[in-house]
Image (spheres, rainbow, N blue to C red):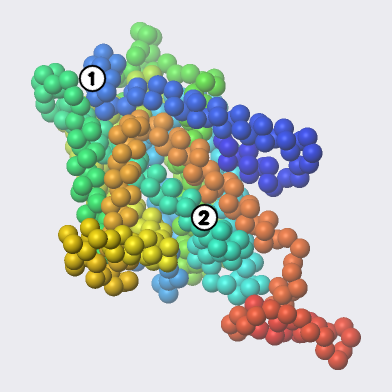
Amino acid sequence: KFGLFSFFAITSPSHGNAAVKLRVVMTKFFAWTVGAAATTLKNDTGTGYESASERGPRLSECGAAPVITHVLEENSSDIKISSWQTGVILFKSCFGVCTLGMPFAFRNAGIIPGVLFIIFVALVTNYATKLLVWNKRHLQETRCRDIVSIPDMALTLWGAPGLAFTNFVILLCQIGNCIAYFIFLSISLTAVIDDMFPSLAEEHAYSPYVVLIILWSCAFSFLVQLKDVASLTPLLMLAQVAMVSAVLLVVAYGLSFPSVCDKDGTVGIFCKVHTGARWETFPVFLGIAIFAIEGIPTVLAIENSMQEPHRFEEVFDRSQAMLTVVFLTFGTLGYWLYGNNTKSVITLNVQGMWGILVKCLLCLVIALSFPLQFMPAGHVLKMFSEHPLFLRAAGAVLDTELVRTRLPAASGLSVEQTSAYGWAGLKALAVFGAGTVAILFPHFGHMISLLGSVTFSIITFIVPPGLYMTSMRVTPAHSLFKCGGGRRRGRGIKWTEHPFVIAGQGDCGWAEE
């Protein structure tokens, strides 16, 4: 919500008292979001934190895998993909575990406001994404820069501070995704354990949720160290199959067992739902919607890999329209089928053997795809481990008397070895940090709402228009001249013998206008 207001604040002229009032409104709206999303944070988690009475009734990628690898690594790929493959990748980039939280989002918003605002968020996200693509093309035409990611664009327009800022935001977004993975995996396995061993949950007062988080953290701290993470890319297709199966099973279960609904005696299958707005919990819905629809960090690399990049807007519109239809259909139908019993992860509403199977399948594919999800964050951490400040700090630690006496081999590490070990330590620290946050805030729906409201709103609604406005300001003299294919050799202007011809030394060499 803060991001939405900021988007309109920086793309429209505001002066004097109007600007002050707008900043006040933005601040109040942001505080309202955090306050609402933090309310009853430990209720309806499915983690075993609530009492039993609160639980409710017991109820081929077609050759695109190498391209996904390059997208995750944000490399300029020589592999070119068709428009159809681009649409599939764009759809898959947003169709993830957040989809399973859409019914809970509609429970917090109401049917009619939820439908309207999902469409609104999709339209604003669509425009912000196109701003990035248009800006990338503009920079390539005027400055001959090979832009494949948002940090590349930020470095070109905002310099080193912009690069640090965007890398930090992207790092928070990717670690936020990992936090959502931790919560989803642990609450799903907690529900499986409760279903398979009900007597265990009755005899012991503690929940296995915290233990599962610690075990996942230990496992993932080793998995993220894999050097050939790209070999896990085919698992993304399996993850999508499992996700589609989960969605279909949730709907089929709700239609087959209407007793899960809190019927009032007059309802056959569908529950009584709230059609109007629920303003006290509406920010929770809006944050989940932003988290679900956002896919901006990889969009530039995807567009760069297209055979026909001029068709990106058309393909993107179609894929996002399909995503919006899926979110609307599954969100409203899931809420109608389960009513006020709708859990923050809808698969928790599916009981019995089918519920156990779908939860275990989702846990398997999501656990194996965790290193891929962590890969962009790993690249940012690698840049940090190679920074001179980090290397100096690590060298000072290794040069202490304690390290020299206890670990003499460590004190003799080269700069490359120090950076490599530091990178591994930073990745493990990030994984355990994400696990710690998942323990402190175990509610899946509220956590992804907070992530969508804070980190993903910045990268979606603030960074793209900010970069676009910086690029489209009064054109400097050095960018008046078209690129001629040369490399950057400096800047400057000199007059020729003709009074109306200026030879400008731009980013790509000398040219005449």
Q: Which quadrant does the C terminus fall into?
A: bottom right
Query: Does residue 125 sit above or below 444 in this rendering?
Result: below
Say whether residue 14 is left or right of residue 444. right
Residue 501 spot, x, y in % from top left: 83, 84
Query: How many discs mark residues in the rendered view?
Result: 2
Say if residue 106 shows up in the picture: no
Residue 50 spot, x, y in % from top left: 28, 20
Q: Secondary structure at mark 2?
A: helix
Q: Tell me the kind of residue under disc 1.
A: Arg
Residue 481 spot, x, y in % from top left: 72, 77
Q: Which quadrant does the N terminus fall into?
A: top right
Say whether residue 299 is left or right of residue 476. left
Residue drawn at x 35%, y 12% as measured from the top left? 263
Q: Which residue lies under the disc numbered 1?
A: 58
Disc marking residue 8: none
Query: Does residue 355 sit above or below 470 in this rendering?
Result: above
CB under 8 Å between callouts 1 and 2?
no
Q: Secondary structure at mark 1?
A: loop
Q: Nearer the viewer, mark 1 or mark 2?
A: 2
Q: Which residue lies under the disc numbered 2?
A: 166
Say whether residue 283 is left or right of residue 413. right
User: Residue 336 is drawn in which quadrant?
Assistant: top left
Q: Tell me the kind of residue under disc 2.
A: Thr
Q: 222 or 372, which is in the foreground?
A: 222
**Which of pointers 1 and 2 lies earlier in the amino acid sequence?**
1
Q: Which residue is farthest front?
A: 401
Query: Does residue 425 sit above or below 181 in this rendering?
Result: below
Residue drawn at x 62%, y 63% as measured from the top left? 157
User: Residue 70 is drawn in which quadrant?
Assistant: bottom left
Residue drawn at x 70%, y 61% as measured from the top left? 472
Q: 102 or 183, which is in the foreground?
A: 183
